Structures are given as structure tokens and as C-alpha cells.
Amino acid sequence: MRNTWIALLALVLPLAASQGQDADWKVGLARVKVTPEQPVFMSGYASRNKPFEGVHDDLFAKAIVLEDSAGTRAVLVTSDLIGFTADIAKPIRERIAKETGIAAASVLLNSSHTHTGPELSLDPKPEGGRTVADVERTIAYTKQVQDKVVQVVKEAAGKLQPAKLSWAVGLVHFPMNRREFTIERGVILGVNPRGLADRSVPILRVDAADGKLRAVVMGATCHNTTLGPQDYQISGDYTGRAQRQLEAAHPGVETLFVQGCAGDANPYPRGSYAIADQHGDELAREVTRLLGGKLTPIKGPLKVASGEVTLPLSIATVRDELEKDAAAKTGYKATAAKAALARLDKNEKVATEYTCPLSVWQFGGDLTLVALSGEVVVDYVKLIEDALGPNRLWVAAYCHDVYGYLPSARVLREGGYETRGLYAGGIGQFSPAAEGVLVEKVRQLAREAGRK
């Protein structure tokens, strides 16, 4: 009898949470499989020296189109991929705008940053042991993904139905700060139990007009790296597992994952598919718990403020200084200096700044979603909380343009892997001043979007 009551409560509580709320939104949902069918190289670990060998679980791109009562539309696309660089993402957003009428500035592309997914690139130059044929397959696959993302948004936009939105925040325990401090080697990629980590799990619940669950958008802040460079099977890692578990428990319900400021967080422990399942199951259980509890209704209107921010780089621009930096045997500064010298040899200028997109979505007075580009370290969660206030706030990264790592001033001062800066779209490490520039731009966009 006790188990029967528990089962009944699990059904009644979510419905009760949505009753009394008008269906003042319209929502469209769609998904498309993006598992590669041809042998392409995987992304995330430079030590891999051959294409993937099989498929452990399929990868998807999923779209949710939101429309408020005034007809304002925006779209969130999530993907089980490493991340879209600007040269891949910008054409997608522009094509979506052209084919759906949803402004490119209102298109948010987020990736789970799985390291057991395919490489994405439009660069025709073979590098890192790749052959011309390898590069051609990667380019063909990348263009196919672009087409599929545009198509899945068009499909979702054509399936708008009345809906109710609500949200809540929970907790998982597996995100671990990975900046380990050592005496001999400085800051290394390791395990730092006392380091900062964002263990929050924000969710956006989507109900039909009758209160039936239609979709859930969930977030976490942790590199999708339970699996390592020794793994050559395509997989969504822990985030893919969490989505599958939720969909199995709620047939017909769409699940989407949004990655947070995970630049300096790894899963703990890590190293096997069994552990990836363990972390995915933990995330799915917490989302299930939240779905069965009390959520906060989200009213409109929806307002999107989007723009670009120009972040200063820290790199010498004259040959003498670059040669001095390049003389170091190792280090990201030396690597950047060597690349800059190669540009000078071609009579090209060395950039001193990098411009990237970001956006803020404001859901009435109920929720603010901040979408940052790049692999952003966790410090920025607190910095943005200090700038905007900590309540009714969801901070995401890996959006729009995954150009490299965006470290905080603290991380730059301490050193370590996350200071490496750009690995796409240019060369150079970020200046400590980039921190303040980014936060001020977020503050400006939040004001434009109407956050109070």
C-alpha cells in the first residue's frame, strides 16, 4: 500500500505544480541523430591517432523553440558534440534565421562537450596525423551536421503547441575541480577536492496545456570526460546516459542537456563506461526528483539580448619579444609565440584581442539564462552572480563559439592547462583584463533584457 501511494504521489505532484498556471507559451520540439556514419577522427584528446572504431551510443542534436504570448520566438539547440567554433556556428544561426524567421541573435547553440564524439572542422589542411581523406570526411560530416541542425530547428518551429514552463535547481556530487597544485610541476590536470566547483543542476520543465510533461532541459557543470583517450567508441558520455535514462522513464518526453562553466571541472571518478553510467544515472535521478517536486512557474515575456564582446589577449606583437617567448621549451605562451612568428613571416598581423558572441535570455521576472562562449572556468559563475545577483540565474557556457579556454584572472595568475587560451579562431592567451570586460558585457546585456 505504501508503494502504491508513493507511485500516486509521483504522478500527482508534477500535475499539481503546473495547475493554476495558464499555458501562455508555445513550444516546439524536435531531434535528429548526428552519429557519424563514416570513419572520422574523434575530438577532445590530441593523443588519439586513428578514427573511431564503433558506436557505443548514438549522438543527437535537439531543438526547443519557445514563443511567448506576444509572438517573440527563440531557439535553443543542444548537441552531443564537442562544440561549434564560430566558422561552423555562424552559418547555422544565419541559415536558421533565413529559413524560420527566428533572428540569428535568438538562436542559442550549446554542446555537451563530449570527448567521445566526432571532430568538427571545415579546415582543409591535414594536421595531427590526418590524411587528406580524413580531412575530407571530417568536412563532409561537419557540413552534414550544419544541415541537420538547421533542419531540426525548422521541424521544431513547425510543431509549436501551447505549453507551461517552470524551473528548479538541484545538486549532483560528481563534478570535481581538476586544477591540482603540486610542488614539482605547478598546477596540473588532476583532482582538487578543495577547489571550486559548480554542482548545481538547473532544469526547465515543459508541460502541455493539460499538465502532461513534454520536455525537460537540464544543466550541469562538468567536463564530459568520464571516458578517456583510450576510448574509440562514439558516446555521449555521462550526459548522453542521463538523457537516455530520463527518456526511458518518461516515454515520449524530450530531454536536452546544457553544459555550464565546466572549463576546470572533470567528473570524479572517471575512466570507464561503467563510471559514465554512474554519473549519468546520478544526474537523471536528481532531475527526476526535481520533476516530482515543487517548481517555480515561468511567465513571459521572453526577451533576448545578444551581442559580441571583444576580449584582450596577452601576446607580444613584435619579433624580438616573440622570439624571447618562443625560446621556452614548453608552455602555452611559447606555443602562441611560435604561431605568431609564423604569421609575421607571412607579413600578417598578430591579433591582440578576440571577439566572441554571448547572449542573455530573460523570462519575465522569473529566470535569467546567461549564455557564454568558450570553455569558461567556474570562477565566472560567482563573478556573474556578484554582477547580477544570485537568484533566478542559470549560467551556461560552450555556446555559440567554442574558441578555447576563458580563464579568470585568478587562474591566469596561478597557471595551468586552463590558461592556454585560443585553440580556434586565432592565437594567444587571454589577458587578466578579459575577466572584467566579459562580466561588464554580461551586466549590460542583462539590463537590456530587463533583469531586475
Image: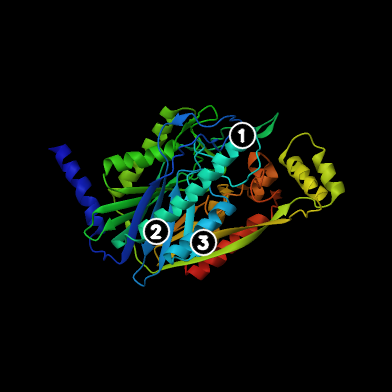
Q: Tell me the SS state at disc 3.
A: helix
Query: Does residue 81 sit above or below 311 in this rendering?
Result: above
Amino acid on which disc 3 is placed: Glu
| CA neighbours of label 2 inside 10 A, class few (<14), some (14 to 19), many (20+) | many
Name the mark nearer the viewer: 3 or 1.
3
Measured as percent of width and height from the top left, residue 77 is found at 44, 53
| Residue that badge 1 annotates | 46
| Residue that badge 2 annotates | 154
Q: Tell me the SS state at disc 2.
A: helix
Q: Tell me the SS state at disc 1.
A: loop
Task: Compare residues 235 and 227 and report the one nearer the observer.
Answer: 235
Figure colour scheme: rainbow
Q: Residue drawn at (82%, 48%), measured in percent from left and top?
A: 345
Q: Quick check: marks 3 and 2 in contact, CB under 8 Å?
A: no
For residue 94, the mark is 3
| CA neighbours of label 1 inside 10 A, class few (<14), some (14 to 19), many (20+) | few
Q: Residue drawn at (63%, 44%), measured in percent from left and top?
A: 124
Measured as percent of width and height from the top left, residue 112 is found at 47, 44
Residue 361 in view: no
Q: Which of marks 3 and 2 is nearer the N terminus?
A: 3
Amino acid on which disc 2 is placed: Lys
